[in-house]
Image: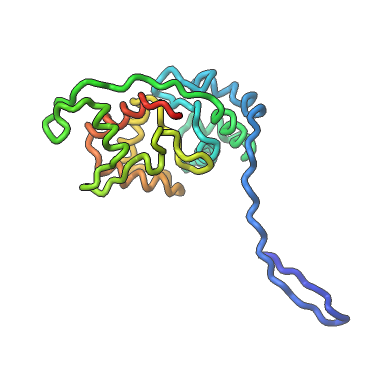
Amino acid sequence: MKHLALCLAPGLMLALSVTAATPAPPKGVVQDGATKAAVCAACHGADGNSLSPEWPKMAGQNEAYIARQLALFKNGTRENVVMLGFAAALSEQDMHDLGAYYATLKVTPGVADESPITEAGPWEGMPAFKVGERIYRGGLPDRGIPACMACHGPSGMGIPGTAYPSLGGQHADYTKLKLQWFREGNGYAADQNGQIMKGIAKGMTDTEIEAVSTYLEGLAPR
């Protein structure tokens, strides 16, 4: 809040309170992001498609999500020793530049698991990826779990311009580990979406988490 004093006449002043406008976030520059991403290639791949499921694919991810997560790494809200080291030196503009660059790249999807589920229960005998598709598109209404595509989009590309990430084509092992991590009650203290995911994952079984994860790996965003 800023206060402005206006002189209406000698000896007469009028004080006005003016609320300063919140500055808009910087807009990422793709070319600058391409240069800055060189150091990221060792883990996330030269084309944004990491070879190891230990590290997530960044290709096709939306700018706002990447910038937001880098900020969380930098301030320690999202704990990761390796990423803290990289994010610590980044400015807000750097984060958006990286996000803008990765958003232009194309994710390379994997192959979804077609083998039938052997665990006794409602999904027994159904192909794993089909179970994942059902949950992704329809949720689990009996448990109050919404369809994943409500936030992550019908083709898994998330919602560009928001903090809802693209998940299509992501390594199944990486997605599974993150869902299990959320289910264990972990989250990012200052991140509302992370808190939402804790509630969703809490109601999912291991079989359902694995099914959704493999379905997403084979899902190619359009």
Q: Give the total number of marks visible in the rendering.
A: 0
Q: Quadrant of residue 1?
A: bottom right
User: Above or below — where is 113 with respect to 74?
Assistant: above
Q: Position of residue 48 (x, y in %)?
A: 51, 23
Q: Quadrant of residue 51?
A: top left
Residue nearest the viewer, comparing 176 with 165: 165
Q: Quadrant of residue 41?
A: top right
Q: Residue furthest right?
A: 10
Residue at 56 percent across and 28 percent down: it is 104
Residue nearest the viewer, comparing 163 with 79: 163
User: Above or below — where is 147 with respect to 80?
Assistant: below
Residue at 45 percent across and 47 percent down: it is 191
The quadrant of the image that shows the C terminus is: top left
Q: Position of residue 179 (x, y in %)?
A: 33, 36
Residue at 47 percent across and 24 percent down: it is 107
Q: Which colour style is shown? A: rainbow
Q: Position of residue 121 (x, y in %)?
A: 12, 34
Left or right? Give the position of 208 relative to 14. left
